[in-house]
Image: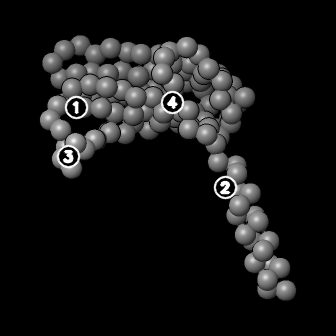
């Protein structure tokens, strides 16, 4: 009986893993479609000291992460790269406005749109 229960728990865990969505990385600003549960990651490049903010309208929750790279085991001088991660939370149209503000000038705002099916 214990083996049967263990096998059922393993099958349930494996099916839950199948519910995890894809990670979608747009390379341009053309509107696209994703599935509910997918994660959209948008790169925001800048120089050191760049501030990145994001605003999501629609069924999604944003998180802004700093991205650090290593070259020959060390952090290179200069990059201020970020990544905006949007986790979808329902069906509908999502608009993501990303403002990239370098420390030496005015910021720019980029807009991305996608539909969650």
Residue 110: which numbered mark, if any?
none
Earlier-in-chain disc, 2 versus 4: 2
Q: Is residue 103 left or right of residue 12?
A: left
User: Is tag 2's residue or tag 3's residue first in the polypeptide sequence?
Assistant: 2
Q: Which residue is mark 4?
A: 25
**What crowding class fits label 1: few (fewer than 14 Cα within 10 Å), some (14-19), or many (20 or more)?**
some
- First-in-chain label (1 vs 2): 2
N-term mark: 1 or 4: 4
Q: Secondary structure at mark 4?
A: loop
Q: Dot 1 corresponds to which residue?
A: 79
Left or right: 5 as drawn, with respect to 18: right
Q: Secondary structure at mark 1?
A: loop
Q: CA distance from mark 2 to mark 3?
A: 35 Å
Tell me: residue 20, above or below residue 42. below
Q: Position of residue 30 (x, y in %)?
A: 55, 14
Assign the C terminus to one quadrant of the image. top right
Q: How many marks are shown on the rendered structure? A: 4
Q: Position of residue 80 (x, y in %)?
A: 24, 32
As drawn, is 59 to the left or to the right of 61? right
In this view, the residue farthest toward the bottom is 1
Q: Position of residue 96 (x, y in %)?
A: 50, 23
Tag 2's secondary structure?
helix
Q: Name the secondary structure under disc 3.
A: loop
Q: Earlier in the sequence, mark 3 or mark 4?
A: 4
Cα–Cα span, label 1 and label 2:
35 Å
Q: Residue at x 43, y 33 (%)?
A: 84
Front in this rendered view, residue 62 or 6: 6
C-alpha gap between disc 2 and disc 4: 21 Å
Q: Residue at x 85, y 86 (%)?
A: 1
In the rendered view, would you say 103 is above or below 63? Answer: above
Q: What residue is drawn where x is 64% and y is 48%?
A: 20
Q: Which mark is residue 72?
A: 3
């Amino acid at each position: 009986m214990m083996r049967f229960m263990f096998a059922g728990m393993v099958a349930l865990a494996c099916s839950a893993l199948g519910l995890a969505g894809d990670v979608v990385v747009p390379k341009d600003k053309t509107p696209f479609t994703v599935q509910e549960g997918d994660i959209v990651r948008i790169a925001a490049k800048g120089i050191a000291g760049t501030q990145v903010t994001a605003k999501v309208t629609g069924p999604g929750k944003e998180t802004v992460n700093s991205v650090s790279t290593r070259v020959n085991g060390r952090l290179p001088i200069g990059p201020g790269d970020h990544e905006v991660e949007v986790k979808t939370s329902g069906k509908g149209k999502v608009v993501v406005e990303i403002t990239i503000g370098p420390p030496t000038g005015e910021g720019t705002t980029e807009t991305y749109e996608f539909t969650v099916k």
